Image: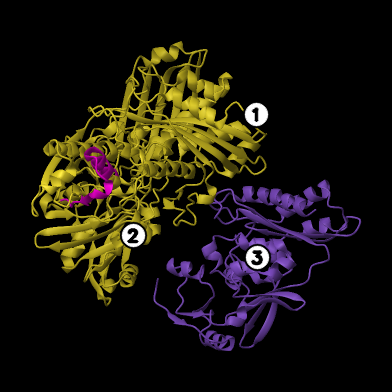
Amino acid sequence: MRPFDYLEPETLDEALVRLADDPDDAVVMAGGTSLVILMKQDLIRPARVIGLRRIGELRAIGTPEGNLSLGALATHGALARSQPVRAHAAALASTFAAVATVRIREQATLGGNLAHADPAQDPPVTLLALDGVAVARSRFGERRIPLDALFADLFETSLEPGEILLRVELPPLPAGARATYQKFLPRTLDDYATVSVAAVVATDASGVCTHARIALGGAGPVPLRAREAERSLVGHRLEDAAIRGAAALAAAATDPIADLRGSAAYKRAMAGVWTERALREVA
Amino acid sequence: MPPRDGRGALIHPDLLDRPERRIDGDDKTTGAARYTADLVVPRVLEAGFVRSPYPHARIVSIDAERARALDGVRTVLTGADVRGQRLGRRLQDWPVLCWDRVLFIGDRVAAVAADTREIAEEAVRLISVEYEELPALLDVEEALRGDAPVLHPDAASYRFLEGRGERPPVPHPNHQGHVAESHGDVDAAFARAARIFEHEFTTPRIHQAALEPRAAIVWLEGDRVRVVSTNKAPFNLRDQMAATLGLAKERVVVDNGTIGGDFGGKGLSTDEFVLYHLAKATGRPVRAITRYSDELTTTNPRHSSRIRLRTGVDADGRILAHESHALFDGGAYAAGKPTVRLLVEGGVSTLEGYRVPAARHEAATVYTNNVPGGHMRAPGQPQNVFASESHLDLIARELGIAPLEMRRRNIARAGDLTTTGEPWHGPDLGALLDRAADEIRAEKARPAGHGIGFAVGVRHVGRGSTTISLRLGPDGTVEARTGVGDQGGGQHTLIQRIVAATLEIDPAKVRVRRLSTEGPQDPGIGGSRVTPVHGGAALAAARALKDKLGVRSVAEAARALAADEALEASATFDATAVDHGACAHAIEVAVDAETGAVRVLSAVLAVDVGQVINPVGLRGQLEGGFVYGLGMALTEDLALEDGRVRAANLGDYKLPTIADVPPLRIVHLSDGHGVGPYGARSAGELVNPGVPAAVANAVQDASGARVHTLPITAERVWRVLRAP
């Protein structure tokens, strides 16, 4: 690893000022589980690293204004155990619990995860299906970024230089909504998903779908929503034909990258299989 | 029949039935154990290496001026400084630093010694090398074409260590090793066959993946070259360094400490040679601690293979004739192979463990511009067994015979001619197979998508010679001195227990002291050697000491010693007997037909390893061997793309985690006839070779999908299931 300066500001304002001093050569570090690896591999060479760990307010998890708010410094472990997270959607808690290993989960943070923008990661998929909105702040103010606009490309977000991710907000779910996260791990159980699917649906009293969200991980350069598949479900009962149709549309919406976990064709097919399985789970 | 060791001891001592307390256990569990990279060496410098980014290129020029000018850089060496020096375990074909051409991505062209690792790495980045790219040979068959460029035009001038001092001749200049051997009238036997089957199988490069990466420290002390290294065979390293560097053997002293796993990979050392030059140039100790990404991309992994098998059977499925053609990708250098024929010997004789009246085997290791291949836990054998046992299942299914029945009809019984042309005189393979079938409940009806697979593995018991000396002191303790280390296999505990059992004393009263290469010659760890060789020497030395005791007990003899007196005995033991350990595998899997994903549900190992010396250590070897084989079966693939290793870290190169390991049942069946001490056989390389084949066979049983290529990924199964 190359030498670098390390700063640990006490407050968010101080961190924002420090970052603004040097927005191109400084990076923000939360848990460091991804950043440090990238630095060790010499893939990024920051002159300055700004550690956020003293900024306790970024750890908060709660429902201050109706929305569930997840602080950017909350660890995966804390989120997996959080009562408000479970109450919102048990599938979200289990998504955080499915990431990597216990050592990583107690160190890696939500904000670090989202800012890393790895399309094989788990939390972005479920958060997308839950209509998550990221909140970021710079010296010049705060802005809200719907999660599907946050992920710009492979390992690239739409965060501007000088911006720090503060939290993710999740709006209340429709009454009776059901959510699931399915992670396909054909290699080892500590691997990244080959593909993953989060599905959230709600139905009315007669069983007709009123709300559908399908999000996919490992299925393109960014975590993605299968909007056509979602639209195909709304207004229909979640029966066999509808589920299969939506799964086929979801597979068609993917743009997978061939890698050690499989070819693009295989991942696309698996996106269909696991969308179908996810929808059967919540139907 | 009572257990006996073939050397006269009729009954094994009760001690051997009790679980051992490992000599190295406390230090390793408390963190007190000191590995090579932990050693505190005053004034030590850190080495860094400039590596080739091309699989094949000519070095045009090297500019190291900026690196030399960097503060904290003590010296920079390039190939020109060590021109002509090549290293290797048998054939010394690998340049200490390349001076004219680089032959794989990762080949070293320059070395730096600096005050810190960070400075060394910065210096490496500051060295610019101009290359002229040359056409790369990345495929074994391409490399064996008549018009292929010759990668080692000066091969005849390379040093070949020991033996006859001469490398066996090969038919093509890009062969590293080649053998064609046969027994029986193979063509006539094929002509008599009712059916003839032919199949091809491929396996990828995989890595030994020892937890501890390689490390080495070299310094000069008077006229001595001092070496501390993770090499598992210190005397061999000494001999290789002496040969390469032009030093008398006595001047090189290798004194290795705790080693964190080996699995065959640590038989090859590459850094120690250039560290000598760096130490000489700077007058300071210099060390290299290999990064794991360099472990995965530039050290000597298991050879990838392409194996074609042809077998003729009679109308009942009995094997009449067999033929194999195996090509192993040896990569840029043969330096990693210690064998005289420069082959991975376990890959030569396909269909081991079965009755094969006539057979012809052709096997070759081939030079390419890929990462050099080396030795890894049962070299060549997992590739062989995957091909052979898959082939056997395919034949059975074609003939409408159950795979288990096919094996029962063909398993080698005592005295049967095997595929090597030698009669079988080893464990009762039929009994092992029957027991494995019983334990997995082979006859039970299984749900759709579930299936079972079998494989049989036999592994030779190692041979060789070593010396162990014992010293009984007045305090009643015995010190056992040996040149062998303990890389985690329990070697020192084994020596301790054999000495204690033979002298009828508490094992806690036996200390094992490892000597450097200034002590008596030792062959090191490898080739399933330590139990028969070092165990045999420990037994012989203990008996020699016992003879000196006469009618006295150890305690009585100790009391008779004066404070500065000791009673000593020593034995040099040459293990020459031929023997095999054996294992029958039965594995149950579930296959997800929509995704191709394979889940291993349970596994049975029925093994014959003769008398057990270290019960806990043995369990570790057998369970560990199973998990090792599971990785090869399902996930491990050191795949190359244009000569570059794609999985350059352990996040991409997937080893099974403990959560991936299914319930495993181990059943011991022994005839007690092992040729090792007290009737022991070797165990370390016994289990892993059969696992991929048993999994592949179970996958076909469960799903109908036959996968001819390792690893058996979900996508490969899925593709076979979807094929028209």
What residue is at 48 percent from the left and 18 percent from the top? Answer: B409
Q: Which mark is residue B445?
A: 1
Marks 1 & 3 on one chain: no
Task: Measure the C-alpha gap from mark 1 to mark 3.
Answer: 43 Å
**Could you classify mark 2 by the number of other residues whose Cα lies within 10 Å: few (under 14), some (14-19), or many (20 or more)?**
some
Q: Is residue B141 left or right of residue A125?
A: left
Q: Amino acid at mark 1?
A: Ala
Q: What is the secondary structure assignment of the residue under circle 1?
A: loop
Chain corresponding to purple in the figure: A
Q: Give coordinates of residue B148: x percent, y percent.
A: 35, 40
Q: Give coordinates of residue A197: x percent, y percent.
A: 69, 56
Is residue B552 visible to us here?
A: yes
Q: Which mark is residue B290?
A: 2
Q: Which mark is residue A124?
A: 3
Q: Which span of residues is magenta-colored?
A: B494-517
Marks 3 & 2 on one chain: no
- Closer to us: mark 1 or mark 3? 1
- Closer to us: mark 2 or mark 1? 1
**Could you classify mark 3 by the number of other residues whose Cα lies within 10 Å: few (under 14), some (14-19), or many (20 or more)?**
many
- First of labels 2, 1 by sequence position: 2
What residue is at 64 percent from the left and 69 percent from the top? Answer: A79
What residue is at 83 percent from the left and 52 percent from the top? Answer: A238
Q: Amino acid at mark 2?
A: Thr
Image position of B40 with respect to B723: above or below: below
